[in-house]
């Protein structure tokens, strides 16, 4: 999950050239030049990111049936991300063909 959060930091703060590298590193069926996980962390660190660990993540659900924000606690502190922005970045960077399809989503931790 730290890689997704690093991708979010690059998405909101990075240049358009840097944003173009936000794509999955696990699929090679389409073009592009995705940053590796370590490259994404390094680019993210230029913008105050460079997260190594996500300690917790929680979604806030709004009255209109959407995820309004995602609150993340990382090794570098806690912050909130707009729910739809998180969904966009997740869908760009998530491995393989994993995607969030709905505007309403939540998180479950598996041990």
Image (tube, rainbow, N blue to C red):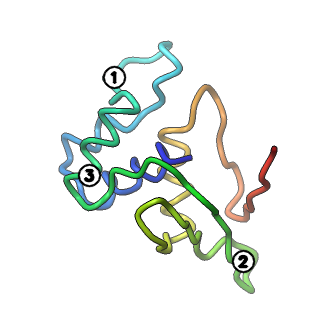
Where is residue 11? Give x, y as percent.
34, 53
Name the foreground residue: 104 vs 110: 110
Name the foreground residue: 35 vs 23: 35
Rendered image: mark on residue 61: 2
Disc 1 is placed on an element classified as: loop
Q: Position of 77 compared to 70: left or right?
A: left
Q: Residues within 10 Å of mark 1 (few under 14, many from 20)?
A: few
Between marks 3 and 1 in the image, the one whose residue lies nearer the viewer: 3
Q: Position of 52 compared to 59: left or right?
A: left
- Quarter of the image for residue 96 reads top right
Q: Is residue 59 above or below residue 20?
A: below
Mark nearer the N terminus (3 vs 2): 3
Where is residue 32? Give x, y as percent.
34, 23
Q: Which residue is mark 3?
A: 45
- Quarter of the image for residue 77 reads bottom left
Q: Residues within 10 Å of mark 2 (few under 14, many from 20)?
A: some
Q: CA distance from mark 1 to mark 2?
A: 34 Å
Where is residue 84? Give x, y as percent.
54, 64
Q: Which residue is mark 1?
A: 32
Residue at (56% x, 37% y) in the render: 94
Q: CA distance from mark 3 to mark 1?
A: 22 Å
Q: Residue furthest bottom?
A: 63
Mark nearer the N terminus (1 vs 2): 1
Q: Is residue 85 above or below residue 90?
A: below
Q: CA distance from mark 3 to mark 2?
A: 29 Å
Mark nearer the N terminus (3 vs 1): 1
Residue at (37% x, 38% y) in the render: 22
Q: Is residue 11 above or below residue 38?
A: below
- Quarter of the image for residue 104 reads bottom right
Q: Residues within 10 Å of mark 3 (few under 14, many from 20)?
A: some
Where is residue 86? Give x, y as percent.
52, 59
Disc 3 is placed on an element classified as: helix
């Amino acid at each position: 999950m730290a890689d997704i959060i690093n991708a979010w930091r690059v998405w909101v703060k990075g240049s358009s050239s840097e944003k173009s590298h936000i794509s999955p590193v696990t699929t090679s069926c389409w073009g592009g030049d995705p940053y590796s996980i370590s490259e994404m962390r390094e680019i993210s660190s230029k913008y105050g990111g460079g997260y190594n660990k996500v300690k917790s993540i929680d979604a806030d659900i709004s009255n209109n049936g959407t995820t309004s924000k995602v609150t993340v606690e990382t090794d570098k502190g806690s912050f909130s991300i707009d729910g739809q922005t998180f969904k966009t970045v997740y869908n760009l960077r998530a491995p393989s063909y994993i995607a969030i399809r709905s505007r309403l989503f939540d998180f479950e931790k598996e041990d």
